[in-house]
Structures are given as C-alpha cells and as structure tokens.
Image (spheres, rainbow, N blue to C red):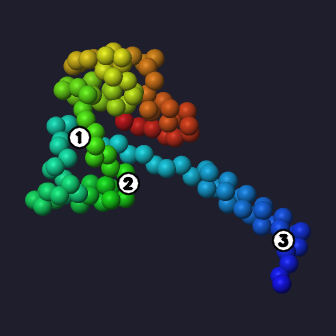
Amino acid sequence: MSTITRRSAIGMMAGAAVAQTRAARRKPNFLFLIGDDHAAYVMGCDGNRLAQTPNLDRLASEGIRFSRHYCNSPVCTPSRQSLLTGLMPYAAGVTRLPTSLDPQKPTLAKQLKAAGYQTAV
C-alpha cells in the first residue's frame, strides 16, 4: 500500500494550482476573415473541387467554422457592423453605405481589448 506524505500532497496541490493558473492565462486566438461578395461554396473545405484554397481550408479544419448563418443586410457595411457590434443594423445606426459607426456603440474589438487581447483591423 502506498502512502502520500503531507509534503507530497502539498507539493502535488501546488503543482496542480500552478498548472491550472498557466492554463487559465492562455487565451484562444481569434481571427475573423470577412470576404466581400464571397460565397462559402467557392472554398475547397465546402466541397468545391475546382477551388484551390489550401490556407483557408487549413484554417477551417483547425478552427471553428460557422456553416449555419445568414447575412442580416444586403449591403456590406451594415452587415459587417452588425457582426462586429452584435446589434441589428438599425440598432447600430448603420443602415446604408457610407455610414460610420457611433464610437459609443459596443464592439467585439472593445470587449476583447478589455479582456487583455490585442486587436487590429
């Protein structure tokens, strides 16, 4: 029968705590690729045998792909602003081209920055 000494138990708990803290510090990376006038069916990872998109296919296989989605505006700017704010175009105040986003509106980039991420557009 093996026994664990108090010193061994404390050492194991400390090691587990350090490992858990290190794991908690690792944040997942985010990469949003938004293509203008780009349909999913033109990518190899979506079954197109003619398309040669090896890098996009690799990113798709290693990350998360959204395959059940819709575009909430037929115009690109309101649609993008909606994606980045989480608001419908009318709620974000962006309903046509060209329109600037109100800097007071919440955005995904602001939330990620507040969580310690570096963001860029």
Q: Which residue is mark 3?
A: 8
**Closest to the observer: 3 or 94?**
3
Task: Identify the image quadrant of residue 77.
Answer: top left
Q: Nearer the viewer, mark 1 or mark 3?
A: 3
Distance in Å between CA atoms under marks 1 and 3 = 55 Å
Distance in Å between CA atoms under marks 3 and 2 = 39 Å
Q: Residue furthest right?
A: 6
- Name which residue type carries label 3: Ser
- Name which residue type carries label 1: Gly
User: Disc number at residue 63?
Assistant: 2
Point out the tag, 3 or 2, that comes first from the N-terminus: 3
Where 69 falls versus 7 (above or below)? above
Q: Secondary structure at mark 2?
A: loop
Q: Residue at x 37, y 36 (%)?
A: 121
**Closest to the observer: 6 or 50?**
6
Tell me: 113 left or right of 34: right
Residue 107 position in % (x across, y down): 43, 28
Residue 35 position in % (x across, y down): 23, 40
The N terminus - image quarter: bottom right
- Tell me the crowding category of disc 1: few under 14, some 14 to 19, or many 20 or more residues within 10 angstroms, Cα based: few
Q: Which residue is mark 1?
A: 35
- Name which residue type carries label 2: Gly
